Amino acid sequence: MGLTFKKHYILFFILFISWAGALFIKAESRHTATLQEGIASEIIRFHVIANSDSKEDQDLKYKVKEALVEELSPILCKASDITEGRSLIKSKFSSIQTLADKVISQNGYSYAVSVSLEFIYFPMKVYGEFSFPPGIYEALNVRIGEAKGQNWWCIMFPPLCFVDETYSIVNSDSEEQLELLLTEEEYEAIKSKKVPVKYKFKLWKTIKKLFS
C-alpha cells in the first residue's frame, strides 16, 4: 500500500513538473516570437535567388549581389530609420533592375530579373557576432530567371550586407545604428546569439522505470 502510494505520488509530481515545464516553454516561445517581431520591425533584409543550383548560376547570383550591395549600401547608410530605408529602396527599384540586368548581360546570360519588397520567412542566420532569430521579415527580393536555385541573404538596412558566413566583424557604424534602432533587450538577444531552445521531456520513459 505504501509503495503504491509512493509511486502514485511520484507520478503526480512528474506530471506536475511536466505541466509547469510546458507552461514555461510556451511562455518562452511567446517571448521569443515577440522579440523577433520587434527586431523585424526595424530591419530590412536582402534576398537574392539564383536561377538554378548550377555553378554558373550560383556564381552569377553572387556577382549580382555584390553589384547591388556596392550600389545600395552607401545610400542606405544615410537612412535614419526603417521608413526612410524602405522609401530609399523603393525609389531605387528601377536602378536595381537596370544594374541586375546589366550584370547578367555582361556575363553572357539573358535571364529576366524581378525586384520586389515583400515579407517572407527567413531561418535563423548568423552575421558575424549577431544572430537573427527565424521568422517573417521585410526584404528586398531579387529573383534571377526561374529563381529555383539556392538563395543568398543579408541585412540590407541597417547595412550589414558585407557580413555573411565569410566574415566575423561588423562595421562599428552599422553596429551602432543597429543598437539605436532596437530595444536594449532585442539588441542583447541578437548580440549574445540567444536562440530558441528545444526541450525534450523523457516523461514516459521515467514513468516506465518507476513501474518496471
Image (cartoon, rainbow, N blue to C red):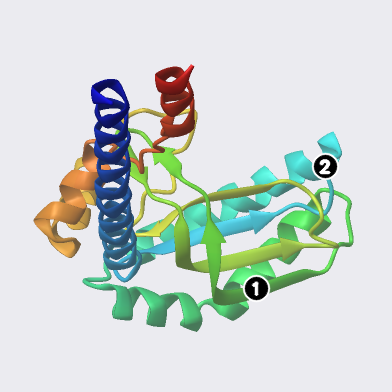
How far apart in space, not on screen, are marks 2 and 1 (Cα)? 20 Å
- Could you tell me the amino acid type at mark 1? Val
Q: Is 49 situated above or below 82? A: above
For the point 13% across and 61% down, the residue is 183
Q: Residue at x 68, y 71 (%)?
A: 98
Residue at 34% over, 61% down = 33
Q: Which residue has dot 2 on it?
A: 53
Q: Which residue is mark 1?
A: 115
Q: Is residue 136 left or right of residue 99?
A: left
Q: Position of residue 149 (x, y in %)?
A: 79, 49
Q: Could you tell me which secondary element the residue under label 1 belongs to?
A: strand
Circle 2 Cα neighbour tier, 10 Å, few/some/many (<14 / 14–19 / ≥20): some
Q: Nearer the viewer, residue 87 or 178?
A: 178
Camera sees residue 27: yes
In the figure, 2 relative to 80: above or below?
A: above
* Above or below: residue 75 compared with residue 61: below
Q: Judging from the image, what secondary structure is the residue with disc 2 in? A: loop
Identity, as a three-letter code, of the amino acid under mark 2? Asp
Q: Earlier in the sequence, mark 2 or mark 1?
A: 2
User: How many residues crowd mark 1 within 10 Å: few (<14), some (14–19), many (20+)?
Assistant: some
Q: Quadrant of the rendered structure where residue 144 is?
A: bottom right
Q: Residue at x 45, y 53 (%)?
A: 134
